[in-house]
Image (tube, rainbow, N blue to C red):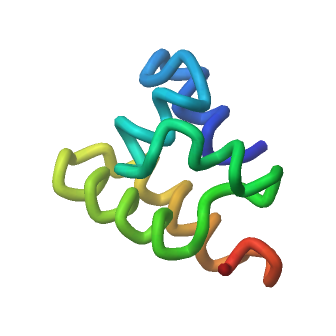
């Protein structure tokens, strides 16, 4: 399960476009441009920091796990 689905399940986002802009701080078409590779390591680190500051520790832990086990092709 990718990070987007954890946010969607909790009702924190309703689309990839919203997730890209509201949570990742990127352009609305960011995930589309990534062509299925998921968010980059930089985007995930920024997301982790945001979640940590907001006290969303369970989601922050999931994002941290995703960063640690990120596929090499998704790191760029």
Q: Depth check: 26 or 74 in front?
A: 26
Q: Where is the C terminus found, in terms of image quarters?
A: bottom right
Q: What residue is drawn where x is 80% and y is 83%?
A: 72
Q: What is the total number of numbered labels drawn onto the structure image?
A: 0
Q: Image height check: is 65 above or below 22?
A: below
Residue 32 x %, y %: 70, 43
Q: What residue is drawn where x is 56% and y is 74%?
A: 41
Q: Depth check: 31 or 10 in front?
A: 31
Q: Image height check: is 42 above or below 25?
A: below
Residue 42 x %, y %: 47, 74
Relative to 8, is 13 on the left or the right? left
Residue 54 x %, y %: 19, 46
Which residue reaches farthest left? 53
Q: What residue is drawn where x is 64% and y is 46%?
A: 31
Relative to 42, is 53 on the left or the right? left
Q: What residue is drawn where x is 39% and y is 57%?
A: 47
Relative to 22, is 37 on the left or the right? right
Residue 24 x %, y %: 42, 50
Q: Image height check: is 7 above or below 39?
A: above
Q: Image height check: is 58 above or below 9?
A: below
Q: Depth check: 35 or 58 in front?
A: 35
Relative to 52, is 71 on the left or the right? right
Q: Where is the N terminus found, in terms of image quarters?
A: top right
């Amino acid at each position: 399960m990718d990070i987007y689905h954890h946010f969607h399940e909790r009702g924190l986002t309703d689309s990839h476009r919203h997730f890209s802009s509201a949570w990742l701080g990127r352009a609305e078409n960011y995930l589309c441009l990534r062509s299925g590779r998921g968010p980059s390591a930089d985007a995930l680190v920024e997301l982790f920091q945001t979640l940590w500051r907001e006290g969303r520790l369970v989601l922050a832990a999931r994002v941290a796990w995703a960063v640690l086990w990120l596929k090499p092709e998704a790191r760029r």
